Image (spheres, rainbow, N blue to C red):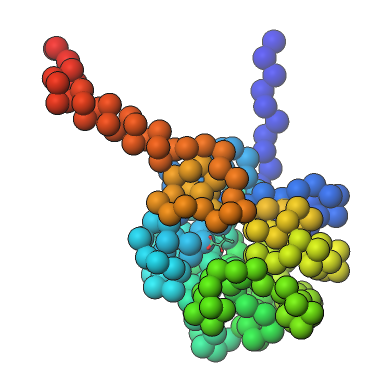
Amino acid sequence: MSVSPKPRPKVRTLTLLKKKRSGEKITMLTAYDALWSSMLDEAGVDVVLVGDSLGNVILGHRDTIPVTLDDMVHHCAAARRGVEHALLAADMPFVTARLSPDEALRNAARLVQRGGAEAVKIEGGREVVPAIEHIVESGIPVIGHLGLIPQSIHQLGGYRVQGKDDRTAEGLRTDAQALVDAGVFMIVLEMIPPHLAEEITKAVPVPTIGIGAGPHCDGQVLVSHDLVGLSRQPPPSFVKQYATLRLDAQKAVRRWLADVEKGAFPGKV
Ligand code: KIV
């Protein structure tokens, strides 16, 4: 007698909070279209993030700064069509959460209404608190993002670990608490020392999701194209590659090229 698999419940913000409380790890990966988001959703990922890493990974930009709200809405709507169970979150791209709280709410609302996002992610600390408060009060769940915040790359002066000295570590602790007070339901901690990520994880009541921040966060996030070895650029040192899809796909394409050249494809009819 075959046993049908247990139906997978929809992941909601509360699901993630319960996972933190029970010590179950949370998983989050990036997707920018329906093909990829459906693959992640079927694999059982908790959160599919339409990250503004869209800029580097898909659109061919050097960094995330040129990514526009229209780009994000377009790709989020595509990713939406592949997701059934995971929570779908989308990044608010460069400056779209910083002009004013009203403007931030308008932009977040587009990601939710047009893109189908169930939450938005905002980079920054105390300076984005008024925007976060306004968005949360309007019924849109917000994920915070601290540490190495790629939209501020010119100010940070490069992709390097943040919060290494006492002053900047204290700034990050204060930012984390400010984000919690503003109403975020989760915080991404990017490239900060593992001991600081552990401290923040223990101090805040909401889940923390690490990327290059060690093993102590409540969950982990990666750019999925890095994880499967598909990215054009070499991945950051903290990434573990679980597949070599770019090389494997190129090998397949070269075999097809050779077959076409020697007349072996499509073969005799
Ligand atoms: O843009 C992105 O993909 C991200 C994650 C890597 C956290 O912000």
Whether residue 2 appears in this view of the structure is yes
Residue 223 position, x and y percent, is: 54, 53
Compare residues 251 and 41 and report the one nearer the observer. Answer: 251
Where in the figure is residue 198, as x and y percent of width and height? Answer: 81, 62
* Side (left or right) of 161 relative to 206: left
- Picture layout, residue 205 above or below residue 225: below
Residue lying at the far bottom in this picture: please name it.
Answer: 100
- In the rendered image, which quarter contains the N terminus? top right
Q: Is 2 displayed left or right of 235 in the figure?
A: right
Q: In the rendered image, which quarter is residue 240 located in? A: top right
| Percent of width and height locating residue 173 | 78, 76
Residue 138 sits in which quadrant? Answer: bottom right
Q: Is residue 67 above or below residue 86?
A: below
Residue at coordinates 51% horizontally, 88% vertically from top-left? 99
Query: Residue at the spot x=40%, y=33% of the render?
Result: 248
Q: Residue at x 70, y 19 (%)?
A: 3
In the rendered image, the vertical position of residue 219 relative to residue 45, given as above or below: below
- Quadrant of the displayed image that contains ligand 1: bottom right
Residue 201 appears in the picture as rendered: no
Which quadrant does the C terminus fall into? top left
